[in-house]
Image (cartoon, grey):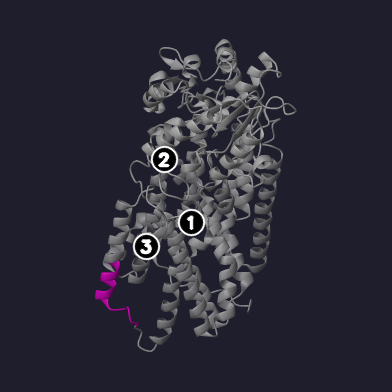
Amino acid sequence: MSSSTALSHPKYRPDIDGLRAIAVLSVVVFHAFPESLKSGFIGVDIFFVISGYLISSIIFENIDRGSFSFAEFYGRRIKRIFPALTLVLLSCLVFGWFGLLGDEFKQLGKHVAAGAGFVSNFYLWQEVGYFNNAAETKPLLHLWSLAIEEQFYIFWPLLVWLTWKRKTLFLVVFGALLLGSFAYNVHLVRIDPTATFYSPATRIWELLIGVVLAYFSTQFKQKGAATGKVWYSRPALKQLASTLGMLFLAFGLYRIDSGRPFPGTWALLPVLGSFLLILAGPAAWFNRFVLSNRLLVWVGLISFPLYLWHWPILSFMRIVESETPSLGYRVLAVGLSVLLAWMTYYFVEKPIRLDSVRVKSRLKIAVLSACVAMLGLIGFAIFQNNGVPTRAAAQINGVNTWDNLTFATPCKFITNGPNHDDWCNIGNAPNKSPTTLLIGDSVGNNFAPMLQSYSEQVGNSTFVFRQFGRGLCHGFPEIAYENCAELVNATRTYLEKTPSVDTIILAANWPLYFNGFDRIGSTPVSAQQFKTAFEKNVAYYQGLGKRVIVFLAPPVGANPRACLTRPIRLSDKSSCNLALAEALHNDGQYRAFFAMYLKSIKVDTFDPFKYMCDETSCKVTDGTRIYYVDHEHFSAFGGQFLADAAKNDLKNLLGKPTK
């Protein structure tokens, strides 16, 4: 395609900037004040439609004119995206260097690299799991949507260029992509909501809805050139489209929340609402007097840098406070985001984007590309170097590693299958025949460091344990999803082949399961179903002549990172405590059933509350060493403390002869 003529652009529409403002304000309010607008995340879907429409309008018009240039197209994208992105990525790295711990800075480095390479959605998709950091502590989480847009614009211009001259072929390919993506989205959201949220395959239909507008706008504009009219130019139709679009968006903002499967069919509300508002044109009443309002238009103009700035600021506040920042700080974060967005737009973006001197423009594109690439490499190096542990910010709390994987290895050595969220280990004496199996989930893994410490106290000749566990796997095959059933079956096979085992310890997140839970990829399990499965499995082990011991769940609800000394803090308030009342509330009502049932079948129990809690609170730290890595999982220090505190009781419990 030609590169001698600059790309033409559609006529500027202030109402589209107003629609951008609604989109970005929805997202910002949702992130800063989620209790006020639980549906604000649909602003991203509005952006997708707008982007699909505007960019495809440029592609279609210039291909028709014979002036489309791939170099010019991607050069403009670089000048549009890279200036603000460079500032935000660089600012995050600078703040992270001085303010984040080793594991936090390591994660940030990976996300900077992914953001610079426009693959954030894939990395965030992979990270979603039982032990992954909360979304609020990922300062570049929001770059997933930018990644999807840029992935779309890598293949879309080429696809249009290859098929445009054969309109039937173009429409067939385009229609297949749109319908296929939407159908896949509707199907997958019921099976894997996380994949549906982050996958480009389930999102491109939203951009393609905007492409529908661009296509028909281009075609009908040509056909109506002689009269100056097109099929949708009637004022009544414009008003109807605008009104319906406004109602769709309003209903979506009112009705959608994070508890609903999304995107799925719910995404039709913001997508079709945006489609209709753009279709209505700038003359429709709502578009003219509301969307074209000067304040909304101004917010729309700075919407991209505002989107980029607001989330890192809120996220960093959340990290350094180790909890949700106060209302005042969140208001301050939004105000600072607006200020930085305005400065970025007027002093960085505009001078770079509006420069029409070709040689200087090419130089800017090269420099911007080099800057983003360099930031990506720096982020990758930080990730590879474990967050640069020699930094002062990383060394302040160097004794606490925030890693409870010490006693977790892949279960492949007994399953011969793929690795999952595995919590197996070969125990304290791998060369000796085991006497005890610890079976359960990641909460059950809490007790592995305790058993390790206990074994050192009594000697490996009398107590040898193995741990077989997997994240969210309670150990009961009747109500387990596929991955759990695989491990349970392998464990039972191992047990049948290992007669030296005389004791089974069952340890898991009992409060979760005894209240009923969602089984991954299948129907939920009721509380009664779980109780029945629990009783059946205890009887199974006892039927093999094994002694069964149940370890109750530890106190849940700790906020261990609030115990840290940080180089940057917003306030002196500390939430490094766990009230007994809160821990008991989080523990649920399962103990009433357990106490009566286990006593009736003569199953002994071990209760961590007895050693970790007094009359008012539960231990989280000894001042230097922190006993948890998150709200419910022990660190190695927690296991050691429990082993020391319960030393005598453990000897009485684990040293009993087999019944």
- Farthest-out residue, right: 431
| In magenta segment, residue 276 | no
Magenta region, residue range: 230-242
Instruction: Find the distance from the CA under tag 2 to the CA under tag 1.
Output: 22 Å
Is 167 left, or right, of 430 in this rendering? Answer: left
Circle 1 SS class: helix
* Mark sitting earlier along the chain (3/2): 3
Instruction: Find the distance from the CA under tag 3 to the CA under tag 1.
Output: 15 Å
Give how far across and how far down residue 422 sits, in percent. Answer: 60, 39
Question: Which class describes the residues within 10 Å of circle 1: few (<14), some (14-19), or many (20+)?
Answer: many
Instruction: Pick the quarter of the image with the N terminus.
Output: bottom right
Q: Which residue is mark 3?
A: 268
Q: Which residue is mark 2?
A: 517
Circle 2 SS class: loop
Dot label at residue 196: 1
Is residue 624 visible in this depiction of the protein? no
- Contact, mark 3 vs mark 2 (Cβ under 8 Å): no
Q: Residue at x 45, y 39 (%)?
A: 333
What is the quadrant of residue 63 in the picture?
A: bottom right
Give how far across and how far down residue 481 sits, in percent. Answer: 50, 46
Q: Nearer the viewer, residue 617 or 336?
A: 617
Q: Nearer the viewer, residue 252 or 396?
A: 252
Give how far across and how far down residue 314 sits, in percent. Answer: 47, 39
Tell me the amino acid under the disc marked 2.
Phe
Task: Select label 2 or label 1 by which is in front.
Answer: 2
User: In the picture shown, does residue 573 fall above or below 371?
Assistant: above
Task: Select label 3 or label 2 by which is in front.
Answer: 2
